[in-house]
Amino acid sequence: MTRLFTRALIRLSPEDPAEDVAAFLQGLVTNDVKGTLPAWAALLSPQGKVLFDFLVWPDGAGLLLDCEASSADALAKRLTLYRLRRKIGIARADDLAVHWESHPGDGGTPDPRLSALGQRWIAPASDSDVAADEAWTAHRLSLGVTEGQAELGDVLWLECNAVDLNGVSFTKGCYVGQENTARMNWRQKVNRRLLVVPLDRSDESRRRTGYPELGLAVDHRRVEDIPADLAPAWMDLTPPD
């Protein structure tokens, strides 16, 4: 029970040996994809709001994007618009699957967002794979980590806890939505955060989505309205000096 069927993989591959796939993605997404991988990153709107989030994995001369399965086709289409005339292949890799387990084991890689999330790996898809999606969602939300369009979509990237969860680089150079994201950081203007809360303590006016089966919800709250007992240990709510 390790496969995440709610995840899909998009392969970015050079169709010409001279093409640099990492350089192409580097100019689009929030994190440094020329450094250590896997890395959590997002493709933003020009205003700095989340369109898609994903993990970026190495794949020889190319890259693999571990993304939400329901938005994989839309993400591939958006990346194709940015490709222009570059000879880079962009296609779903349905022959591969994303796997996860909550405890350390052989062959996996710690989740780059938070080590407590467990480890992930990519393997050939098999008809014998057994779904771990429910266990993954429960584990992720128990740690206060949000992902996917229902939870993050159309929220400013830094309000998605991207700094705390290693989803942004402020030194790698420009990308789509970088100007507003960098301004928010340097001016310390992150006024709201996404927060996983018990359903009975959720503010309906601030709720992004709910998980009644888990008794949880994701709220988009002002920082000053986040009770200390609801903030996960990794969330830094210290006011700037």
Image (tube, rainbow, N blue to C red):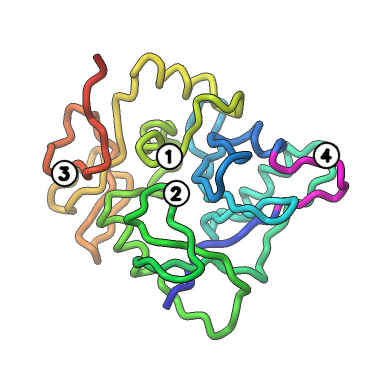
**Left or right of residue 94, residue 69 in this image:** left
Q: Are marks 1 and 2 in contact (CB under 8 Å)?
A: yes
**In magenta stretch: residue 1:** no
* Camera-nearest residue between 127 and 63: 63
Secondary structure under tag 1 reads loop
Q: Magenta includes 13?
A: yes
Residue 86, numbered circle:
4
Label 3's element?
A: loop
- Residue extending farthest to the bottom is 128
Residue 58: give x, y in percent of width and height. Answer: 64, 53
Mark closer to the observer (2, 4)? 2
> What's the CA distance linking mark 3 and mark 1?
21 Å
* Label whose residue precedes the other's in the sequence (1 or 2): 2
Q: Is residue 27 above or below residue 38?
A: above
Query: Which residue is identified by label 2?
Result: 112
How crowded pointer 2 is (Cα within 10 Å; few <14, some 14-19, many 20+) is rated as many
Name which of mark 2 and mark 4 comes first in the sequence.
4
Mark 4 and mark 1 in contact? Answer it, CB < 8 Å.
no
Real-space Cα distance between discs 4 and 1? 29 Å
* Disc 1: which residue: 166
| Residue under pointer 3 | 230
